[in-house]
Amino acid sequence: MIGDIFRGCPTLINAAGPLTRLSGAPLAPGVLEAIRDADSVSVDMFELQAHASRAIAQATGAEAGVVTTGAAAGLLLATAACIARLDTGRMNALPNTDGPNEVIVARGQRNGYDHGCRAAGARFIEIGMSEGLAGAGIRDVEPWEYESAIGPRTTAILYVQSSRSHPPLAEVSAVARAHDIPLIVDAAAELPPGGNLKRFVAEGADLVAYSGGKVLGGPAGTGILCGRRDLIVSAAMQFLDMDIARNTWLPPADFIDSAQLRGLPRQGIGRGCKPGKNEIFGLLAALDHFVAEGDAARHARWRDTCRQISDSIRPCSSPEPMIEGLGTTDRVPLLTFRYPDSTTANEMRASLIAGQDSVHTRLDPFRPECLIFNPICLRPAEIPRLIAKLSACMPSPGDRTGS
C-alpha cells in the first residue's frame, strides 16, 4: 500500500518552488500514465531517443534533441559534445584531452552547476566583471570580451540565461558564429514563458539545456538537451549504451548517420546521464502538456492559488500580503510579505519550517526581508494546511510590525 511506502519518511509543503532539493514539481497530467504504459513494452533506446528527438525538435525549433537526467547532465553532455565532436577516440579519452578544451564564460555567470562542464574535461576562461552587481561600478561583460578570449584551444562559449544575464544572448551568439564556436545555453529554469522553448535556438544557441522536473512537470530526474544535430549526435554517443557490435548497430538515420563515424566509442563520460524508458516517455508527455496548456492557463492556476492564500490570511496578517507578477504571463506570480528587516523574515521562515506541516518558502538573496510563497508545487489539499501553519506563525496583534 502507498501508506507503507511513505512510512518513516517526513514530507513537507513546498512553497519554495520546483527546487531539486525539495523533490521538484508535481507531475503534469498524463505523465504518470505515460510512465506506467512504458513499463508494458521494451524498446531500443536509440530508437526511443530518436523518437524523443523528433518531439523535442518540433517543440523547440532545434535540429535535434535528447532526454537527459536533468539540466546539469545536459551541461556535461553539451560540453563533452563540443570537445569531442564526432571523434570517437576523443570521446573515449574524456575527461582527458590534448586538444581544444577551453570554455569561455562570463565571470558573473559562474555557478555551482557548471561543475558538469568541468567534469567533461573543460577548462574555463573567465571574462568580465559584474561591477554593477558588486556595487563597484556600472559595467558588466561586453561582447568584445568574448571575442578577445577566443584562442586556438577554445571549444565553446557557455551562457547562463537569466533575467540579469548581460550582454543579451543574441550579441554573444553573433560573436560565436563569427568564429564558428559552439554556444551552450544553460536555460535550466527559464520556463515560463513557453516561448523560451524556441527563443534560445532562434537567437543562435547551438545547444540548450532545460530542466524537465521544474515547470515542465516531467519526472524530477529528467532534462532536455537540444540544438545542432551533429552536437546532439556526439552527446548521444557519449551517454547511450554502446556495448554493441558495429554490424548490428542500426540507429535511425534521421537521428544518427552512422556513416560519419569511424567506429563506436566505449561507454562514454555521460554514462550516468542516461534516463530510462519510463522517464523519457514521462518527459515527452509533460512536454506535450506544457505546450498544449499555454502560459495564460498556467498563470491563472498559479494566480488563483496565491489569491486563495492571500484572501485567507489577510485579516490576521501584518504586513499586508502582495501578489507579484500579475501583469504578465511571462512570470510566475508570487505571494510576498515584506518585513521591516531580514531578521523578522528569517524568523518567520524558521517558524514555518519547524514542527508539523513543515512549510518551505522561497528565499530571494536580493530581498532577504521578504517572505515569498511560490505556488508551482502547492497541491490543492496542502493549501488549507499551509494557511493554518502561516496563521499560527503570524505575530499576535499586539506584536505586529506593519508595512
Image: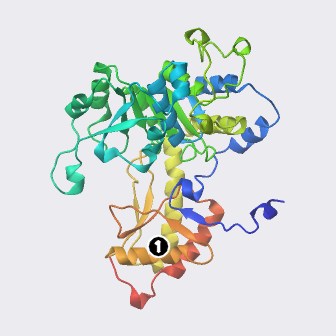
Looking at the image, what colour scheme do you see? rainbow
Across and down, in percent, residue 257 comes to 59, 12
Q: Is residue 242 above or below residue 224?
A: above
Across and down, in percent, residue 27 comes to 64, 48
Look at the numbered disc 1 and give the secondary structure of its residue. Answer: helix
Residue 206 shows up from this direction: yes
Q: Three-letter amino acid code at disc 1?
A: Arg
Q: Nearer the viewer, residue 145 or 252?
A: 145
Across and down, in percent, residue 47 comes to 69, 22
Q: Is residue 381 above or below residue 388?
A: above
Q: Is residue 79 above or below residue 115?
A: above
**Residue at coordinates 65% horizontally, 24% vertically from top-left?**
51
Residue furthest to the top: 259
**Residue at coordinates 35% horizontally, 67% vertically from top-left?**
368
Residue 164 shows up from this direction: no
Q: Are there few (<14), some (14-19), or many (20+) residues within 10 Å of tag 1?
A: many
Where is the N terminus found, in terms of image quarters? bottom right
Tell whether 66 sits left or right of 144: right
Q: Nearer the viewer, residue 19 or 118?
A: 118
**Residue at coordinates 45% horizontally, 35% vertically from top-left?**
121
Where is the C terminus found, in terms of image quarters? bottom left
Across and down, in percent, residue 32 comes to 72, 44
Residue wearing tag 1: 349
Residue furthest to the left: 137
Q: Nearer the viewer, residue 138 or 251?
A: 251
**Residue at coordinates 44% horizontally, 36% vertically from top-left?**
196
